[in-house]
Amino acid sequence: MTVVRDVPARALAVYAHPDDADVSCGGTLAAWARAGSVVHVVICASGDKGSLDPATDPVALADVRAQEAAAAAGVLGLAGHHLLGRPDGEVDNDLRLRRDLVAVIRSVRPEIVVCPDPSALFFGSSYVNHRDHREVGWAAVDAVAPAAWSPLYFPDAGPPHRAREIWLSGTFEPDVWVDISGTIDVKARALQCHVSQLGEAGEHLRTIVQQRAAEAGAEAGVSGAEGFRRITPAG
């Protein structure tokens, strides 16, 4: 097991819904930003279906969730957040999404791209990983390797850039961890921005964040952590 203490100069997180990055790697993004890294996040879906109330106006909900995402990005200290605005459930690893992601990668020029592990489907016996998470994971991986670094892919999307590593969150095979002992509360505050999804969770939410960080930290030998599978693309 490896606790990675080096901080990338630039990093990009690519996730599906407005709260996904905060849930999956908010402590890591905050720790990197605090240490001087230029961190951006791409949110591919609008969050317009993030309600079980049939009376919900999807357009209005998407607007609310965009505001919540901006507030959370501010709490984490991110340098930028990019909203692609796909409807929930309609995110596909297609040419258009890969082109959009390549354009952001070439603009931000990250050393590390963080995204969901697209191979993770079932968690336990009751949780099915949302298709949008899986589609975004595959699209992010495909955008990094080889599309973003090849000048023949999407030549109108900016000069090629090779990200050094891909870090997969929500993975069954973590092999690197980031110590988030100093940013657990920042992660909890970012999550509290997503009132439309989490309500006024307050202390209960902070307790859950601390518990999950402690579980990952136990694997890494620190008090609180987030774990990832590290991929170093060759080619």
Image (cartoon, rainbow, N blue to C red):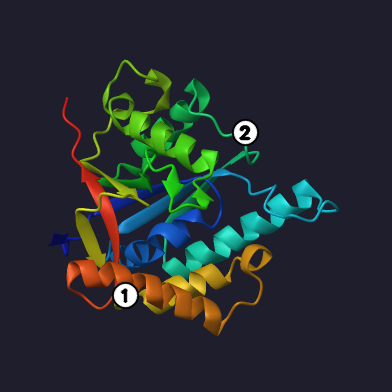
Q: Label 1 amino acid?
A: Ala
From the image, which quarter does the C terminus lie in?
A: top left
Q: Identify the residue shown where x is 24% and y is 64%.
A: 178
Q: Is residue 177 above or below residue 48?
A: below
Q: Nearer the viewer, mark 2 or mark 1?
A: 1
Most distant residue in the front direction: 125
Most distant residue in the top direction: 152
Distance in Å between CA atoms under marks 2 and 1: 35 Å
Q: What is the x, y in percent for residue 113?
A: 31, 45
Horizontal side, residue 88 vs residue 27: left or right: right
* Tag shown at residue 72: none
**Which of these two is toward me, 22 or 129?**
129
**Which of these two is toward me, 80 or 26?**
26
Q: Identify the residue shown where x is 48% and y is 70%.
A: 75
**Local crowd at mark 1 within 10 Å, few (<14), some, or many (≥20)?**
many
Most distant residue in the bottom direction: 203
Q: Identify the residue shown where x is 33% and y is 25%.
A: 147
Q: Label 2 amino acid?
A: Glu
**Callout 1: SS:** helix
**Callout 2: SS:** loop
Dot 1 corresponds to which residue? 214
Q: Is residue 139 above or below residue 218?
A: above
From the image, which quarter does the N terminus lie in?
A: bottom left
Horizontal side, residue 203 vs residue 56: left or right: left
Q: What is the x, y in percent for residue 202?
A: 57, 81
**Which of these two is toward me, 110 or 223?**
223
Q: What is the x, y in percent for residue 199?
A: 66, 72
* Tag shown at residue 90: 2
Q: Quadrant of residue 227?
A: bottom left
Q: What is the x, y in percent for residue 226?
A: 31, 63
Which of pointers 2 and 1 lies earlier in the amino acid sequence? 2
Q: Identify the residue shown where x is 25% and y is 78%.
A: 223
